[in-house]
Image (tube, rainbow, N blue to C red):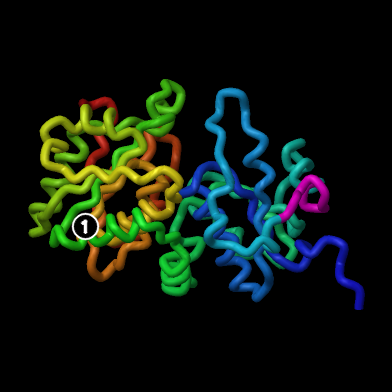
Amino acid sequence: MRAPADPTTLGITSRLVGGLGNQLFQYAAGRGVATRLDCPLFLDQSPLAHVGASDTVREFALDWLIEPTQLIDSGKSQTGRLISAVRRRVPSFAGGRVFQQQGFAYDPRITQVSSGAILSGYFQSWRYFAHIEDELRQDLLAHIPHSAWQSQTAAQLQSLGPWIALHVRRGDYLLARNSAFHGLLGRAYYERALALLKSKGVSGQIVLFSDDPPSAKTMLGELASDAVLIEPSAGTHAMESIGLIAQASAIITANSSFSWWGGWLANPQISMVVSPSPWLNDGAMDEHDLRPLQWLTVDAGFGQA
């Protein structure tokens, strides 16, 4: 029997947009559907090359995780033509191939998706892959890159005894249009999170992870004075830092998918996770499906120092 011209018609294709954390959500949602249907998973990285002039440029960040045969060139496939149709605002899901996520919360229509579908959205909810949680967590942890820097840092952190991973997201969040949507966390949020952990009997060395360490240390003030700062060596993969966050006794996330995954990959029976509420400064977003049920929250305090 001849193989189909486009193998994606037999599987699930996830479109990749955003940085590493977002790509992990899109991969996990696609894997959840593909597992349910017992079909292959493909990833379309072409949207990463088509960003607006004012948007942050992102690279394909899942090279450590997937097989090259799972990547497709949507510009040369039926997938690409259907994605172009979506961009022209053709109806996205009526039993057809393209599933466009609606809203920010979990979209239950994903259970209606069948083989050959293209998933388009951010899929920022644990519910999209709750049925494969243990398998997915074990697989991601097993594939995380382990450079010499990662191994040395892991040993250093283990020697600290109990430690608290504290993630500060800056970078493009400092841009006015991004901070207006995402919100910029200040020192007050981290103080509240540490106080909550203390009330739960959790203490330990603070270990600071940030995409902009100088800005993070300035914002944190005295909180950063005794913190251990994690500074990845050149050439290391960002996933290595997420893997380190997952080893902490407790994790204080930023409103960032980067530390969301650090919290999710941590052993839920051992590590306590605190996250900001609301997650986004845009109050129109329904966030009730974003966080795993066991996570703790404290007031984000957007606009506070």
Residue 3, quarter of picture:
bottom right
Q: Is residue 88 visible?
A: yes
- Point out the image quarter for the C terminus: top left
Say whether residue 105 is left or right of residue 292. Answer: right
The answer to which of 269 and 2 lies nearer the viewer is 2
- Point out the image quarter for the N terminus: bottom right
Q: Position of residue 18 (x, y in %)?
A: 54, 42
Say whether residue 218 is left or right of residue 30. Answer: left
Q: Looking at the image, which residue sits at the far front? A: 148
Q: How many marks?
A: 1
Residue 293, quarter of picture:
bottom left
Q: Is residue 182 above or below residue 152?
A: above
Q: Is residue 277 visible?
A: no
| Numbered range of the magenta stretch | 72-80
Q: Position of residue 19 (x, y in %)?
A: 51, 43
Question: Pointer 1: what residue?
Answer: 156
The answer to which of 174 and 127 lies nearer the viewer is 174
Disc 1 is placed on an element classified as helix
Residue at x 46%, y 49% (from the top left corner)? 21
Name the amino acid, label 1: Gln
